Amino acid sequence: MKKLTLLIRRIKYTKHRKLLAAVLMSFVIVGCGILGYMAHLYFAVTPQLAGADFNNLLPITSKILDRDGKLLYEVGGEIKREIAQSSEIPHLMKEATIAAEDRDFYVHPGINLKSIARASLANMRAGRVVEGGSTITQQLIKNTLLSSEKTVQRKAKEALAAVVLETQMTKDEILTAYLNSVSYGSNVLGVKKAAATFFGKELTQLNLTEVATLAALPQSPGRLSLYIGNRKELDRRRDEILEQMFSAGVITRAELEAAKTAQVDVKPIAHPIVAPHFSLMVRDRLIEVYGREKVEGGGLVVRTSLDSELQAHVEEAMKSERRRINSYGASNAGAVVLDPRTGEILALAGSFDYYDSKIDGEVNIATSLRQPGSSFKPIVYSALFTHTSYSPASILYDVSTCFERNYCPKNYSGTTSGPLPIRKTLAGSLNIPAVKATAIVGVDQVINTAERFGYTTLIDRDQYGLAVGLGAGEVKLLEHTAAFGTLGQAGNFNAAASILSVKDYADRELYEFKPAAQAAIPAEVAYEITNILTDNQARSFIFGANSPLAFSGRTVAAKTGTSQDWRDGWTMGYTTSRAVGVWTGNNNGRYMRYNADGVVTAAPLWRKIMLRAMEGQTYEEFQRPENMRLVAGEYLAEWQLTGVSSARLATRSERPSDPRWERPVQEYLKRKQEQEAAQQAAAIPPPADVGGAPDSDTTPPAGGGGSGRPPADTSQPIPLVIPPPPTDTPTANL
């Protein structure tokens, strides 16, 4: 004892004395700080817990409405909720919930450090979230009393409140309150309403498989939804709960195996989501902006752009056309209607039937990537007209040509038509001239122009090459429709918009849509492209005079498209106030029937929708910019005037210095000259009083025909117009 006393005295006077005192003081200060903070939190949460009615402390449902205020979809589901007394809830339902959410529920004081550690380890092993660390008591607190913000202070409040709550309520009361407040997805809160909604049963009628299925849902109600979620993942989660119930001795091995293999009959949804592809697209956008917690429980009131009456007509039109479209080997279709003046989405159908799993109906084709085929050509020619002096009157040679990388495109008909004005090459959707246009203006310039039209998916420029001019890049139907609408708005682009306003539960405005148009191309170019796409006579040499693209008494611009091997059929079109896009095909990329092109698969459906979309709209013609000049029958922009000459037909290719371009043209001209000479030699001289032989200079080049299509239109001679002096890289004049 004496030695110990001496040792202590020595320590007091050593150099470590001050350090030791500082460390001890730090512990005291930190300890006091923690105690003070916990006391602060205690006094903060205690009043909230005092007399709390957990049946009323619930999130507020967010509502998605159409443009007129009609309900489309409820996100959250407060109204789909019933209160169950503890005696109504089966023992197995309680045990399944404990197995799924909180195995140590009956032994912990509100928080469970062991459970947190065990969940972390299980999640790391599985590589995904298979188990949560929060107790049922903590989840009840979070769901009803506290916000879901991810901060240390909120988590500390939650833990302390859970401990306090455990002293105020029994375990069964806490579990019952939890089962009455937890979300089961599909707008259902509480286990009683979940049993009735999903299975059409009272709680006491549920079997073991149904009990475990319900217990699986709260982990992720949206992802594991019985209606629109991943059923395989839900079944896996259900089986994990059953295994845990067996391990806990709640069920026998025989009951476990029987429950795993039993079929679950889900009751059809009583109140389907109106326009499900559109409504869920809006929901997902809201979650991106405001976060899942606020969208699913913040009581947002969202007014969208959807016109419910027009949407119903689009769905009915698709239903009426389904069998016909199916007959061409296309199992699915999608349609979009926009107001191009603002970009507002008026109708959107992402498939024939959202609930048809055989066609992957839940996939929204309007936002999926598909090759547009020839329906992309208006964008190509927009780039050409904007950045060179080429115009609708300029000549392009439609002759078999091999380009760089030995790329040798063919026309859809398999034939060629010789020199043609661009008006006809675009209206007739000829492939070879479109590739030439792409090469002249450049792939980069085509994609730059497309991006100004709102396309966001043409990312890998090196991947496409000249084939981008034939729609080799993948686009979204929604963006494609908005791009076509741009052409009818003097080249001003409005991005597709689905949300008009967002308000919170207290009617405070969080967002209001305001159109913000941006110039994509000059108004002159937009008018030229539109004038071609509304020219039924110009396209009749390919499509005939009475195709579904022709309208009587209304000016409607239209363009079809078909991707390689008939995998995608498109028809796109617009007026001054409506833009309509239709896609047909198979979600898995399987090709349709031979010759199932856009004009036979998509155009009839597109026509039905366009006719209905135009109803009630004031008829307006597309306005020509005042500064355009009439030259050789075409209205041209000022920078295009240098590319016009009426002296002669073009006798050289667009790139005379390139043998790949020049040789096919000279071969064509030689054949034409030989044919004319043979015709003159074989002609019978007319009587002396009638005159000489017919003037061969007015004979149009041979072309057209093939595959049962009409021959080339010979009713008018080809305009005597040539392109600007050709160069490998034309200088942009704008």
Image: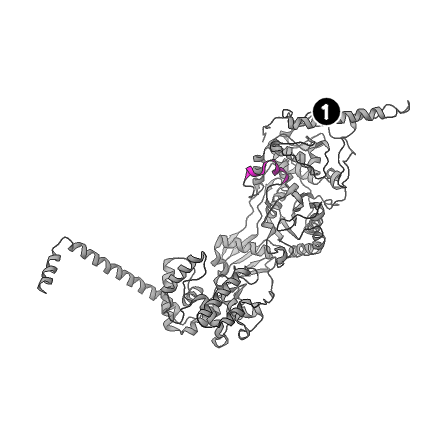
Q: Is residue 469 magenta?
A: yes
| Secondary structure mostly seen in the magenta stretch | helix
Query: Is 200 situated above or below 463?
Result: below
Residue visible at 75% across and 27% down in the picture: 671
Residue sitting nearer the eye, 571 or 567: 567
- Which residues fall within the magenta stretch? 460-471
What x and y, as percent, mark residue 261? 55, 67
Is 359 situated left or right of 415 in this image?
Answer: left
Q: Quadrant of residue 124?
A: bottom left
Quadrant of the drawing holding the N terminus: bottom left
Q: Does the stretch in magenta take in 143? A: no
Which residue is at a point 89% across and 25% down the rendered structure image? Answer: 686
Residue 490 location, x and y as percent? 62, 40
Location of mark 1 (residue): 648
Quadrant holding the C terminus:
top right
As shown in the figure, which amino acid type bears the numbered disc 1? Arg
